Image: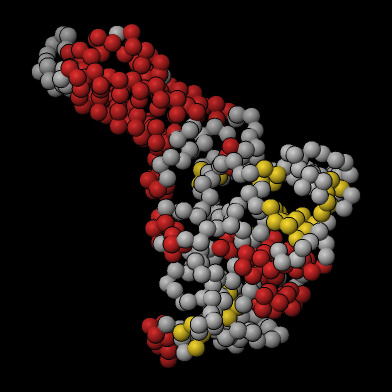
Amino acid sequence: MASERYDVIIIGTGAGGGTLAYRLAPSGKRILLLERGDFLPRERDNWDSTAVFADAKYQVKETWYGKDGRSFHPGLHYWVGGNTKVYGAALLRLRKEDFGEIKHHGGISPAWPLAYEDFEPYYCEAEDLYRVHGERGVDPTEPPASRPYRYPPVSHEPRIQELHDALKREGHHPFPLPLGVLLDEENGKPRHTSACVRCDAFDGYPCLVNGKADAQIICVEPALQHPNVTLLTNAYVKRLETDSSGRTPPLRKQRVRLRELAIGRAVYEARIAPCRGPIARRGHRPMSPSSAATAATRYLLVSLFFPFSALDKILNHKGAVAQAREVLPEGPARLAILVGLGIEIVMPLAILTGVADRLAASVMAGYCGATALLWKRFWKPGDFWQAGHSQGRELFWDFLKNFSLAGGFLLITFGTKGSEVRDFLSHPLRSSHPYKLPEGLR
């Protein structure tokens, strides 16, 4: 590809990019499709609810940040076909009123420059292309349409049919959702020629039998039948450089990581490279004051362990073993010191660098609690209430210090929201990326 030239470069192969490629493919123009992901594997896990939802096997492992600096996981899917690989394929039209000015509680949404009538012919084309099964005239909120759906509505399951009939008897207006599905059925059962088998794993799942009308099946693969269309997978577009108008690529060549992409006469930077982990690792700006404060707070938390506590276990190894022998035999005591030394070196470094920092912080919290309960037993000397010097009170303050540190580490691990607890339990190795925000999200 070092000297290939293209008339059109499309970034992304989802509903937008895939459909555009399908429409342009017969034009004969040289078209390059760039997709950040690869083809979604067809496997048993496609229909396994634990793999799809609990393990989030097909979602990207990225951390994004809101304006308030809080992290979240966007639930995106980088595959050929984009998010349509797992969508529910309910393809409703926007209502006619949506294109006009709308007053909301938070303000006024201005009218579109184009009206619903301008889009209506293209809605019809898109519904035909994406094999939308539906029925006109039964949805009381449906906007006007120039022709009926090409494909009949998907028949109801018996229980849903009962609910449908009961709602109609009560004077309501239930209607079948318009669904994009490659279904050919008779009497509620798929024919032998039908790609869709009416399984119970549809919305949110990849389709193992390619029965869902997603952008890969409907648009990308037919477009690739044209010799003028090329697909490049695992391609990350870092940025597009334009002139001052923000629309036209500059008429000058730029190096593009061993690859040069040309649109007509204009060659511009697209930065094609394989995906390299979470978005928060790319496009960093200099560390902000809040990030510096986060780094300082983390260092204060771990400074008691690395290097000071770890160094003490090395320089005063005999004393450390003797303390461990207060509750453990000789062999396990020496092993406990080695394990503790490893924890006190590795885990603080992970917390400071942000690499699997939440898991490291949870280990440190457990370590603080365990050492407090085993070696800071303030109740054991029996002199807690004694006047003057008291070993019990000295141990008590160490006991409190350990559990205070454990609380600090738990805040790093779980944050302050229940969703962060669930996220950590689902993805314990993910980093919280505490210091720097990705460009464009600050």
Q: Is residue 201 left or right of residue 60?
A: left
Does 25 sit left or right of 138 as displayed?
right
Q: Is residue 341 left or right of residue 187?
A: left
Q: Position of 147 compared to 199: left or right?
A: right
| Location of residue 410 with respect to 249 vertically, above or below | above
Which residue appears at 66% of the width and 59% of the height?
A: 13
Image quadrant of residue 258?
Answer: top right
Image: 37 above or below 89: above
Toward which corner of the image does residue 39 lie, by quadrant?
A: bottom right
Q: Nearer the viewer, residue 299 or 314?
A: 314
Colouring scheme, one of rainbow, by chain, secondary structure, one colour:
secondary structure
Q: Is residue 371 above or below residue 243?
A: above
x and y percentages locating residue 315 in the rendered image: 33, 8
Tell me where residue 370 sits by quadrant: top left
Is residue 65 visible to the viewer in this orientation of the structure?
A: no
In which quadrant is the C terminus drawn?
top right
Please give the name of the residue rendered at 73% of the width and 63% of the height, measured from the top-left corner: 21
The image position of residue 300, as x and y in percent, is 43, 21
Q: Is residue 337 visible?
A: yes
Q: Nearer the viewer, residue 149 or 438?
A: 149
User: Looking at the image, which residue is at 13% across and 11% down?
Assistant: 387
Image: 305 above or below 317: below
Q: Position of residue 96 (x, y in %)?
A: 67, 76
The residue at the far bottom in this view is 169
Q: Relative to the observer, which residue lies in front, 155 or 51?
A: 51
Image point (81%, 49%), residue name: 4
Q: Position of residue 263 (x, y in %)?
A: 84, 52
